[in-house]
């Protein structure tokens, strides 16, 4: 992976320097991508490559800027569509599990609860990772085009699209997690939700 020099670590003896190496975001993002959802993540490295070609004053500047605009909007839509589809599936499965528990608490399956918990956390991580990727790219975009009043307005418009998208603004997945924890606590831990939270393992499971 690619690395860059970071800040010095404090607490070393005088005269001894220690370099902290920080993995670049694009490389660290790839390590967190859930393989089965790979095509639904923001294509960070591709858009970063477009930004590198965007040189103000060059003959290709306007065309490259238009390309960036089109690609970033397509990527926002792609990420959001995946999130909303997975959110709907999670909501449906949690609702079915809740109904099953109401009918027959003794028939609640631990394995199903753990699987849903894993998928929910994968989706939470998906949202967090893509949101941070969009923010970093848009920050780089503003740095390239310059901070004139019009350019800042364009940057804010893109950022608003990201902020208003379901993968960032929806609280449905958190509600599903809360409901799942309550079901698990009631079925197996005498209603203690804190113990349910400790019992769940954040592991990467399969898709819905």
Image (tube, helix red, strand yellow):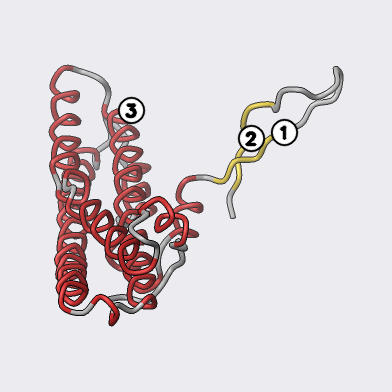
Pointer 3: residues within 10 angstroms few (<14), some, or many (20+)? few
Q: Nearer the viewer, residue 194 or 43?
A: 194
Residue 204 is left or right of residue 105, and the answer is: right
The image quarter containing residue 54 is top left
Q: Earlier in the sequence, mark 1 or mark 2?
A: 2
Instruction: Label 3, secondary structure: give it.
Output: helix
Q: Position of residue 31 (x, y in %)?
A: 50, 59
Q: Earlier in the sequence, mark 2 or mark 3?
A: 2
Vertical order, 19 against 105 (above or below): above
Vertical order, 124 against 89 (above or below): above
Pointer 2: residues within 10 angstroms few (<14), some, or many (20+)? few
Question: What's the mark number on residue 19?
Answer: 1
Vertical order, 19 against 167 (above or below): above
CB under 8 Å between callouts 1 and 2?
yes
The residue under the point 35% across, 53% down is 193
The residue under the point 32% across, 54% down is 124
Residue 131 is left or right of residue 167, and the answer is: right
Q: Earlier in the sequence, mark 1 or mark 3?
A: 1
CB under 8 Å between callouts 1 and 3?
no
Residue 118 is left or right of residue 86, and the answer is: right
Residue carrying label 2 = 5
Task: Work out which quarter of the rendered image holds the C terminus and state it.
Answer: bottom left
The residue under the point 29% across, 77% down is 108
Q: Position of residue 76 (x, y in %)?
A: 19, 51
Mark in front: 1 vs 3: 1
Residue projecting furthest to the bottom: 107
Real-space CA distance between mark 2 and mark 3, rounded to the nearest whole angstrom: 21 Å
Residue carrying label 3 = 143
């Amino acid at each position: 992976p690619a690395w860059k020099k970071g800040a010095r670590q404090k607490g070393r003896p005088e005269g001894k320097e220690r370099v902290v190496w920080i993995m670049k975001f694009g490389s660290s993002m790839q390590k967190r991508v859930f393989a089965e959802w790979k095509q639904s993540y923001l294509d960070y490295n591709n858009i970063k490559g477009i930004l590198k070609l965007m040189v103000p004053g060059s003959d290709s500047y306007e065309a490259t800027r238009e390309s960036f605009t089109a690609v970033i909007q397509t990527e926002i839509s792609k990420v959001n569509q995946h999130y909303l589809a997975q959110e709907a599936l999670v909501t449906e499965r949690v609702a079915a599990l809740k109904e099953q528990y109401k009918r027959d608490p003794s028939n609640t399956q631990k394995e199903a609860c753990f699987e849903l918990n894993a998928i929910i956390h994968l989706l939470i991580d998906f949202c967090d990772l893509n949101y941070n990727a969009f923010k970093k790219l848009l920050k780089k975009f503003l740095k390239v085009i310059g901070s004139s009043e019009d350019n800042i307005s364009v940057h804010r418009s893109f950022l608003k699209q990201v902020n208003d998208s379901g993968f960032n603004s929806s609280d449905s997945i958190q509600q599903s997690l809360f409901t799942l924890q309550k079901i698990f606590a009631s079925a197996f831990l005498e209603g203690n939700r804190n113990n349910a939270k400790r019992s769940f393992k954040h592991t990467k499971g399969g898709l819905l």
